[in-house]
Structures are given as C-alpha cells and as structure tokens.
Image (spheres, rainbow, N blue to C red):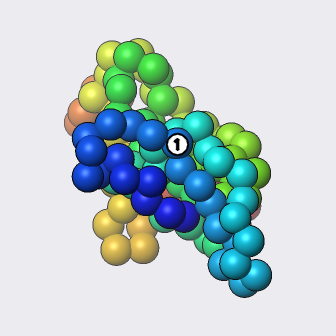
Amino acid sequence: MIDSGAAATGVATAEATMTILVGVKGKTCDFNMDYRYLGTDGTVGVFRVDNPQLGLVAKARHLTTCDTLWELPSQVGSLARAWRVNTTLVQLSDDGTELMSLVAPS
C-alpha cells in the first residue's frame, strides 16, 4: 500500500495498492487505508470503521482488487470499536461493557 499523502495534507484521498512480489501498481481504492489499518494476512486487509452512525466496526478488503470481502456489523450509534493488540483483533461490544477477541470462523 502506498500513502497518497492524506496524512500530510489532512485530506482523505484514494489509496493505490502495490503487488509487492512483482512491483506492479494495482487498482486505486476509494477509501483511506492509513490509520484505520488493523492487519492483514497478505491478501486481505482489515480496516477499522470510525463512524458509529454507519453500523459497522470493521471491513475486510482484498488488497489487490479493493473489493469488500466481509464487514463486522454493529448497532447504529453504538460504542462498538475494533483494535489490534499485538496479533489479536479485539472488539468492544455495542453497549461498551465487553471486550471480545475476534477469530476467524472455522
């Protein structure tokens, strides 16, 4: 991923992906990746959603195509948030009273 300068300018801009193994520029994504980034497995990036009015805590995006692969829902206006603690994704419940470790479905 390449920082398109949003941090320097304070303006949200599109991000370009890079295929690291071959150094080819990928599709330009229509969302800001920088500070919302939670982690990746090398193919899928997980990004925090900071607007509680959207009813989402996080989104997973394919790092080459920018397609949304899954979303982690929450109640609109809730206290739900997601963080990365070392290698673990953690979610705060909608009512703000519980912390949960997020794991991939089996």
Which residue occupies 72% across, 59% down? 26
* Residue at x 35% of width, y 47% of height: 6
**Dot 1 amino acid type:** Ala
Vertical position of residue 24 compared to residue 48: above or below = below
Is residue 91 in sight in this rendering? Answer: no
**74 or 29, nearer to the observer:** 29
Q: Is residue 66 above or below residue 2?
A: above
Camera sees residue 35? yes
For label 1, the SS is: loop
Q: Quadrant of the N terminus?
A: bottom right
User: Which residue is at 72% across, 51% downward?
Assistant: 27
Extreme residue in the bottom direction = 21
- Judging depth in this view, the residue of 48 and 7 nearest the camera is 7
x and y, in percent, of residue 51 in the image: 36, 26
Q: State the residue position of label 1.
A: 14
Front position in the image: 75 or 52: 52
Q: Nearer the viewer, residue 46 or 100?
A: 46
Q: Which residue is at 62% across, 60% downward?
A: 17
